[in-house]
């Protein structure tokens, strides 16, 4: 299952992973992944871009 996040501005982002590197993109590609265990999604207040943050 692919993780999808809709930001506060209404734009959809899909989570992708390449090894230990995680990033969000506006289109779904072959390397789209589900939300990794131990992480949650936060949003940049200014730009609305989603980011992964490790749970403490």
Image (cartoon, rainbow, N blue to C red):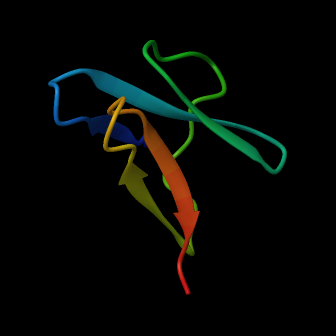
* Residue lying furthest front: 46
Residue at 44 percent of width and 29 percent of height: 14
For this rendering, which residue is in front, 39 or 43?
43
**Left/right of residue 50 with respect to residue 23 in the rendered view:** left
Residue at 33 percent of width and 35 percent of height: 46
The percent coordinates of residue 47 (x first, y second) are 36, 29
Residue at 43 percent of width and 43 percent of height: 1
The percent coordinates of residue 5 (x first, y second) are 31, 38
**Left/right of residue 48 with respect to residue 32 in the rendered view:** left
The percent coordinates of residue 50 (x first, y second) are 42, 40
Residue 21, placed above or below residue 38: above
Q: How many marks?
A: 0
The percent coordinates of residue 31 (x first, y second) are 66, 27
Residue 28, placed above or below residue 7: above
**Left/right of residue 21 with respect to residue 34 in the rendered view:** right
For this rendering, which residue is in front, 48 or 5?
48
For this rendering, which residue is in front, 50 or 16?
50
Residue 27, placed above or below residue 2: above
* Residue lying furthest bottom: 56
For this rendering, which residue is in front, 13 or 35?
13
Residue 9, placed above or below residue 23: above
């Amino acid at each position: 299952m692919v993780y999808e996040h809709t930001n506060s501005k209404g734009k959809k982002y899909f989570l992708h992973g390449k090894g230990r590197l995680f990033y969000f993109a506006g289109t779904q590609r072959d390397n789209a992944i589900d939300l990794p265990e131990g992480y949650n999604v936060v949003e940049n207040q200014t730009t609305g871009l989603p980011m992964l943050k490790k749970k403490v």
